[in-house]
Image: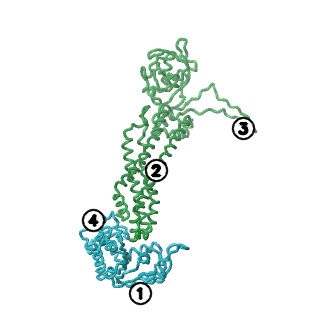
Amino acid sequence: MNGHALLEVRNLVMTYGDGETATPVLRGLDLRMERGELSALLGPSGSGKSTLLSILGTLLRPTSGHQEMLGEDLNRASDRELTEFRNRHIGFVFQFHHLLPDFTALENVIFPAAVRAGRETGLMRERGRNLLERVGLADRIDFLATELSGGQKQRVAVARALMNQPALVLADEPTGNLDRESADQVMRLIEELNQKEGTTFLISTHDEKIAAYCRRSIRVVDGRTGDE
Amino acid sequence: MPYGLKIALRYLTAGKAQTALLTLGVAVGVFVFIFISALIGGLGVYLVQRTVGDIAHVTVEPPGRDAGLLLPTDAGEVLLVAQPATTQREQLRTAAAFLPLIEALPGVSTASPQIVGNGFLVRGQTRAPVGVTGVEVDKISAIADIGGHVIAGSAALSSNTMLIGSTLARELGLEVGKVVTLLSERGVERPLLVSGIFELGLEALDSRAAFVGISVARTLFDLPQGISRIEIKLADVYGADAYARRIAADTGLVATPWTAGNAQLLSGIRAQENSGTLIKAFALITIVIGVASALLLSTYRRRGEIGIMRAMGASRRFVVTVFVIQGAMIGTLGGVFGAALGWLALSPFPPPELATIGDLPIDVRQGAFGLAIILTAIGAILASILPARAAARVDPVTVITQ
């Protein structure tokens, strides 16, 4: 394994069900990502993009294959270790933002840090405010998630993904539910964060315009990957 | 503030109506628990009070005198027939020594030395059997509240007066101020003035009891020294068994608690307590089921959020904590609210000792308020474990991809 690689998966297989109902989704997929990449994950619906993101995000264990990130062999980690690893090193942005509706924008942003520490601290609130300012929501800090527009919610979700300064942010169709203007706003934000802070992004999309923001495109076809 | 507590509080305050209804449900359960505790406890106090209010809690009597066996123990097999002595009466010769000892015991309200015997009241051609109790004149109301039940005359006794029951007075056509002859079982005759007539509501006493001063009784029963028995009243009637054992051990006399002759009453009270416990258990079970189902519903409603929390790195233990805290808070809040409700509703009831027939004998002191709150909190925590575990099992991938 190259010491510089952020993550590497080899011969990744994921099959849902077994016996006659077994449905293979990933069929020996290989992928290697370096730090600081801004990559698009492309492919038709059902090609296995979301499954791959779930595995890379340690939410799902593959049926077989090798998975390493930051030099750690994730195949051998326990559920508790994976949860901790995910909290420290991986940020998520989902298509449907998935904010906690009874919490304010700031509380949503600092959740990953607070849940790790077991309490909220002034430092966390400070960082949360800064992140919300960075995503252009300085005037929405104390708004409940339900009081924000779709684009604003997604920007809060981006800020939340960055809260623990993760090595990798996985975004699954982050603009899929937004109008073009909001989608561009979110993508410009991601591009800026990648360039200025060197945060690695892997963005699943089937929108070529979104993929155009990325420097690398990885296509998933038939459960295997190929660079374009 | 611990983060789990913050999330739990936010969930509870986010659904105010649901939380209020759930807490109210728990409070009603706790109120039932407290009401049943106070009612069953009060009923016990009331029944015991009605039963033991006018009788001695412990009666101290002389030990029976066994015939001495003069044969040597190694004389082989001995057949022995023992017959109680009829010529000599049992008496407490050393009562004067024991009385201060007994009166000094903590928890003893009063001790009344008495001389008792039987006799006849003779008026013209009419004779009526009567049980005579000789008491110290200032202790006429020490055991049964004779003074409080005098319906004619007064309870004061002197060297030539007596008090008789109302039924007995009617039988013999006696009124206060009339003189009647008392013929004792020892054959002593003495004319006595009826100074008061009492009605206790207990037929055995109203129709067959007469009270005289202890000096009169000495003459009547030819007992220049000693007494027949000491009747004792205790502050705590339920301590009678222990006191009787202690007095018997300290004095070597026979001490009989009131419970010895009231086994049926005690088993009745115990049966009541058992039914009360059953009702209370059902109230607790209802609380547990209510809390469990409400939290289970909440778990289902918040599946999405739980999945997101898990994806953001919340551990299973954290999710369990959030739901268990919710259960604990609902249980404690409902418990305190229900206890306060119980206190407010039950406090106006008079203590069962003072309750009259027809009153609900509620004893607010036996409401088991602390126990109700503790059991409810524990029950609610246990009830939250099932939903909490269900929440912890939520698969974040399923939720995110939905």
Query: How far separated are the C-alphas under marks 1 and 3?
Result: 107 Å
The reply to whether the C-beta atoms of the residues labelled 3 and 2 are less than 8 Å apart is no
Q: Nearer the viewer, residue B380 or A185?
A: A185
The quadrant of the image that shows the C terminus of chain B is bottom left
Asked if marks 4 and 3 touch (Cβ < 8 Å), the reply is no
Q: Which residue is mark 1?
A: A3
Seen at 67% across and 33% down, the residue is B68
Q: Secondary structure at mark 4?
A: loop
Amino acid type for the residue under numbered disc 3: Pro
**Residue B310 visible in image:** no
Mark pair 4, 3: CA separation: 104 Å
Q: Nearer the viewer, residue B103 or B233?
A: B233
Q: Is residue B126 above or below residue B42?
A: above
Q: Which mark is residue A175?
A: none
Disc assigned to residue B72: 3
Quadrant of the frame with the N terminus of chain B: bottom left
> At label 4, which amino acid type do we have?
Phe
Q: How busy is the neighbourhood of tag 2: few (under 14 within 10 Å), some, or many (20 plus)? A: some
Residue A206, x across and y down, in percent? 37, 78
Q: Position of residue B185 (x, y in %)?
A: 58, 20
Q: Residue at x 73, y 34 (%)?
A: B79
In front: mark 1 or mark 4?
4
| Residue B296 appears in the picture as rendered | yes
